[in-house]
Amino acid sequence: MNILFVCSGNISRSFLAEILLKNEIEALKLDNISISSAGLFVFPGNPPDPKMVEYLLKMRIPIKSHQARQIIKEDVDWADIILVMERDHAREIERFWPKVKGKVELLGKYISEGQNVDDVVDPFGKSSYYYRLAQSQITLAIRSFVKKVLLDKT
């Protein structure tokens, strides 16, 4: 299974989701799962957001090098599931690549089920409150995704 996380700049939300899911997969010793992340409006090569790095270090999760990268057609073709942070991200991906519609999902659906699915808040450049909110949303969503999707399929 190939999982792609997408946000705006690929330095905060999709970066965090990628690292958290990789950590979960490694801890659970799950095989045949690949994870990547990209952004829709990227400055290629940007480093990860220091506040997200700090959060991962507090959780004792090792971080390998990361540079922001733009989503491309090959990413969309590669992915079995594309998890986006906002409805606008889903619309943008589906506008560029209409055939992917069935594999694009809001990451927030793994936190709040039903029709009231929340976007994952974009904390970049905002106060620590928004960082804590985004970190909590992503952490909860990743744990739920692992239970509902990955553990049910293994």
Image: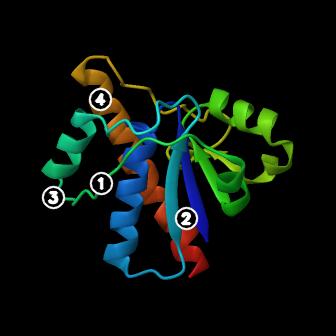
Task: State the CA–CA distance, disc 4 to disc 1.
Answer: 21 Å
- Decide: marks 2, 4 in contact (CB < 8 A)? no
Dot 4 falls on a residue whose secondary structure is helix
Q: Position of residue 144 (x, y in %)?
A: 47, 57
- Residue at x-position 40% and y-position 46%: 15
Q: Nearer the viewer, mark 1 or mark 3?
A: 1
Observer-nearest residue: 120 or 79? 79
The residue under label 3 is which amino acid type? Arg
Residue at the disc numbered 1? 65
Pointer 3: residues within 10 angstroms few (<14), some, or many (20+)? few
Q: Nearer the viewer, mark 2 or mark 1?
A: 1
- Residue at x-position 23% and y-position 34%: 51
- Residue at x-position 37% and y-position 34%: 134
Task: State the CA–CA distance, disc 4 to disc 3.
Answer: 18 Å
The residue under label 4 is which amino acid type? Tyr
Residue at the disc numbered 2? 148
The residue under label 1 is which amino acid type? Ser
